[in-house]
Amino acid sequence: MDASPLSSAELQQFLEQEKEKAMLNEMVAKLTNVCWDKCITGTPGSKFSSGESTCLSNCAQRYMDMSIIIMKRFQSMH
């Protein structure tokens, strides 16, 4: 079995993809923690209340918008 080593470009691409996955997972975890703590004030039942659903949706949207703004600023620095 001939296992040729990854080229430098392939390795770099793989590392970038893994870094992006890790960043996405971290963002989802932070979003979940922040929005849950902000919007779910009581013991959750089998369904979210209307107010909780609206709060969670708004919180997630604001978080995503801010993440995009920050990402664009970092990209413009390179």
Image (spheres, rainbow, N blue to C red):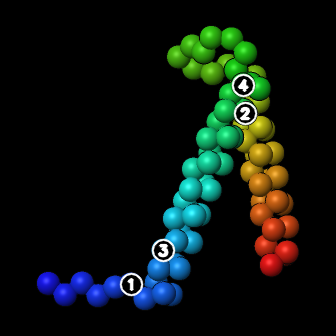
Residue bearing the label numbered 4: 37
Whether 28 is drawn above or below 22: the answer is above
Instruction: Identify the residue shown where x is 29% and y is 87%.
Output: 4
Q: Mark 4 and 2 residues: CB-CB less than 8 Å, in contact?
A: yes
- Disc 2 vs disc 3: which is toward the camera? 3
Residue bearing the label numbered 2: 34
Question: 55 or 35, which lies in front?
Answer: 35
Q: Dot 1, how many residues are within 10 Å of its Cα: few (below 14), some (14-19), or many (20+)?
A: few
Quarter of the rendering occupied by the C terminus = bottom right
Identify the mark nearer the N-term, 2 or 3: 3
Residue bearing the label numbered 1: 6
Identify the mark nearer the N-term, 2 or 1: 1
Give amino acid for label 3: Phe
* Percent x, y of residue 46: 53, 16
Instruction: Identify the residue shown where x is 77% and y is 63%.
Output: 71
Question: 39 or 76, which lies in front?
Answer: 76
Q: Mark 3 and 4 residues: CB-CB less than 8 Å, in contact?
A: no
Give amino acid for label 1: Leu
Residue bearing the label numbered 3: 14
* Percent x, y of residue 35: 72, 32
* Percent x, y of residue 43: 62, 11
Q: CA distance from mark 3 to mark 1?
A: 10 Å
Q: CA distance from mark 4 to mark 2?
A: 5 Å
Q: Dot 3, how many residues are within 10 Å of its Cα: few (below 14), some (14-19), or many (20+)?
A: few
